[in-house]
Image: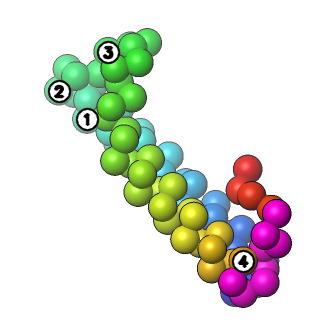
Amino acid sequence: MTKEEFYAKWLELLMQSIDAEQAIIQCAEQHGTWKMGLDSNRALFKTLEKTYRGKIAELERQARTEGILPESEKSK
């Protein structure tokens, strides 16, 4: 994997997570479980955050293993 491929995959994962977040919000609004401005909505995203953080961490680990991403460079 090249550095450009890494960043393309990272961006793809980010866009997938945004799309999934929007789908969760839309579904919650349709079912009446979305409450505007409430922190209680955060619970709807726990699994999503865990899933995509794990995928991004795995991608970064792979990039470090391949020497594409230095050990000190973290995702932004």
Question: What span is colored magenta in the figure?
Answer: 65-72
SS state under label 1:
helix
**Pointer 4 and pointer 3: residues touching (CB < 8 Å)?**
no
Mark 2 to mark 4 CA distance (whole Å) = 43 Å
* CA separation in Å, label 1 and label 2: 6 Å
- How is the structure coloured here? rainbow
The answer to which image quadrant residue 65 occupies is bottom right
Q: Nearer the viewer, mark 4 or mark 3?
A: 4
Write down the residue under mark 4. 64
Mark nearest the camera among 4 and 1 is 4
Whether residue 71 appears in magenta in the rendering, the answer is yes
Residue wearing tag 3: 35
Residue beneath disc 2: 31
Which amino acid type corresponds to the residue marked 3 in the rendered image? Lys
Q: Residues within 10 Å of mark 4 (few under 14, many from 20)?
A: some
Q: In the picture provided, is 28 more to the left or to the right than 17?
A: left
Can the viewer see residue 26?
no
Which of disc 4 and disc 2 is earlier in sequence? 2
Above or below 34: residue 64:
below
Q: Can residue 28 be seen in this view?
A: yes
Contact check, label 1 and label 2, Cβ < 8 Å: yes
Quadrant of the rendered image containing residue 28: top left
Q: How far apart are marks 4 and 1 (CA)?
A: 37 Å
Q: Distance between the residues labelled 3 and 1?
A: 12 Å
Q: What element carries label 3?
A: loop
Amino acid type at circle 4 is Arg
SS class, disc 4:
helix
